[in-house]
Image (cartoon, helix red, strand yellow):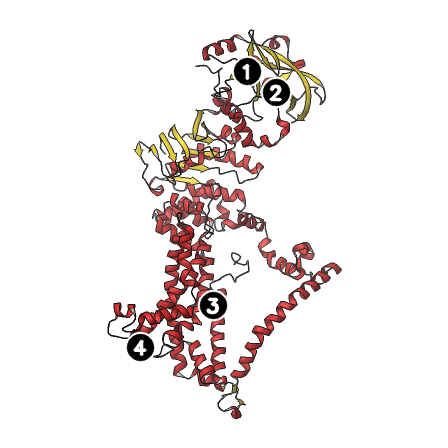
Amino acid sequence: MSKERLSEDQASPGSPADAPGQAEVTSANGSGRGGRAGGGRSGRRTLTEGQRSERRLALLLCAPAALVMIAVTGWPIIYSIWLSLQRYDLRFPADQEFVGLANYVEVLTSSYWWTSFGVTLLITVVSVAIELVLGMALALIMHRTIVGRGLVRTSALVPYGIVTVVAAFSWRYAWTPDTGYLANLFAPGSAPLTDQASALAIITLAEVWKTTPFMALLLMAGLALVPDDLLKAASMDGAGPWQRFIKVMVPVMKPAILVALLFRTLDAFRIFDNIYVLTSGAQDTSSVSILANTNLIQALNLGIGSTMSVLIFLSVALIAFVFVKLFGTAAPGSDTEGRR
Amino acid sequence: MSDIVLDRVTKRYPDGALAVQEVNIEIADGEFIILVGPSGCGKSTTLNMIAGLEDITSGELRIDGTVVNDRAPKDRDIAMVFQSYALYPHLSVRENMAFPLRLAKLDTATIDRKVSEAARILDLTQHLDRRPSNLSGGQRQRVAMGRAIVRNPKAFLMDEPLSNLDAKLRVQMRTSVSRLQKQLGTTTVYVTHDQTEAMTLGDRVVVMRGGVVQQIGAPQHLYEHPANLFVAGFIGSPAMNFVPAAVADGRLSTALGDIRLTDRLRRAMERADAPREVILGIRPEHFEDASLVDERVRAEGDVFTGLVDVVESMGSDKYVYYALDEKARSAELEELAADSGSSDVPASEGQLVTRLSAVSPVREGDHHEVWFDLGKVQLFDPATGRNLTLEP
């Protein structure tokens, strides 16, 4: 209801065009009070003394948080970019030297990198796709449950509450030949974790089992955004359950679906713990994160390892960019959805 | 277009709560019928049962003679307009209106033709490509109506379709809803809690209270011959005045003074085997400034003199409020008061509202004499709420 009112206000002629300018003024003042001052164009010039001091206060209040952010995230990123431009192997510290983009050439021409990249992409796409379907089903169940709601929701969320490494170990034991119950059940006499295809399938399974609840949780929040009246109207208009789902529910909750997909894709692309525990990256099952870890921590090659880290960072940034710009996913915390 | 029959339709929720009890309504083809009552009276539940959005616990619902109790909403060929409009936010106005047609798998040319036609009727043609979020409340309401009429359904169901509009627009839309219904001639069931809408729109009005139908009839009939206290108090604005009255020595002793029992009242009371304590009801417009009533008419009524509390001049007439010592009490009146919120206002204790001619010289603080028409006085049984003066 309040959302409707909000958009009703925007419906006055010309207001969509004004909206960005207003937003600018609002953010510049740190409060909505200056909204009518000069319509935004000359807003910066005509700030009153009070507004200027308010703005100064806003900057001061934001400063500590900004400084902490720079210290804990900005600096490591810059430092690893710096490292990625050096030949820097801790086994041969004397050979440290600035080599420009040579490390990038080295990594991007390596078959190890591209194998890992392919494996990571495969796991990401397959696991996120399965999670979306299962998560949606789970969300619908949790949303519709009337009896024992708390119990259903709690039990659905249990996998998400278990530490990934612990869960990964239990999967590993389950698939270990002879002692593991799943290995005995589905693949007696073989070692599924030692074959690339089956190992990847198990890794994906572990990943899906672990994170579907998270997906379901985000999707359930989206389901709550679909008004009951809309579904009733659709059934009056002649839509069956499946049509209601595809034609009304999914489009209306699309922002929530996109946010859930964004989060999960970013997470899945950085997959590490499950692979680390299940196969340690053997039989070409290593993800880019595993590969970076191998080079950086195990081989102590800071230059190559950092290069890989930077490449992973760029890939993740690219994924986020694609989601936000191309699919129009609302960045968390923003209210731009719907203005497109 | 078709007739709808509710035959002893009952809704009982799993927790045992009885929402609607044995409702019998026969809605004729093309009729505009209003379900009205305070919140929680079961009117929306009844509508949802007709729509198929709620199961019918017992009883039969027939559309065109066919029992449709177990049919899904989409198989009943009924369109519904919701209070929230329930427009699909991701679709344009055109797509919203085309939605039911598309589901019915009509070809594109037919869909285009029907949507344009509906848009023309509702004056939405220039908004067809906009999203609902860019429309005003009144335009959204019209889109919701459009989505209902494109399909040419057997019936329209409307669930308080105007209550999200502001007062002025509501009056405008009320007229256009009425005109549209006349124009299309489609059977319409309309739910509202607003008695003005009920009075102005419907061919017939169904007044409900606590899941039970109180009275069904034409608006004027309900107004003039309410079956009980509840209907009498619910229909009409300002509401009917109720004062306690006791029968003694062939006279009615009331807070309005002693009133002589006319033949009509005496006969009615004998016929109904009335108790000695009754509630007297009289509408504000059946009062008139005593100085403006000529002698001949004066004899048909009685006069009451009281201290004028408040005068509200409406331009066309004056609402004059008198304070009374006593207040009529009954369960139905308390429910009405609770519904209108007036139970929270202590000043509403024992008040008489009269509607006098604008030329009346009455002033606040005066002791003023008003005449009232004894022919319009109604008597109610305080225990059952039954109207004792109703002609059989």
Q: Which sits earlier in the primary sequence, circle 4 or circle 3?
A: 4
Q: Amino acid at mark 2?
A: Glu
Tell me whether circle 2 and circle 3 mark residues in contact (CB < 8 Å). Answer: no
What residue is disc 3 on? A322
Where's the C terminus of chain B, which quadrant? top left
Residue B167 shows in the view: yes
Q: Which sits earlier in the primary sequence, circle 1 or circle 2?
A: 2
Residue B93 screen position, x and y as percent:
47, 48
State how far apart marks 4 and 1 are (Cα).
Answer: 96 Å
What residue is disc 4 on? A194
Q: Are marks 4 and 3 on the same chain?
A: yes
Q: Amino acid at mark 4?
A: Thr
| Quarter residue A110 falls in | bottom left
Q: Chain of mark 1?
A: B
Residue B123 shows in the view: no
State how far apart marks 1 and 2 are (Cα).
Answer: 18 Å
Circle on res. B377: 1
Circle on res. B181: none
Instruction: Between label 4 and label 3, give the one nearer the viewer.
Output: 4
| Quarter residue A229 falls in | top left
Q: Are marks 4 and 2 on the same chain?
A: no
Q: Element under label 3?
A: helix
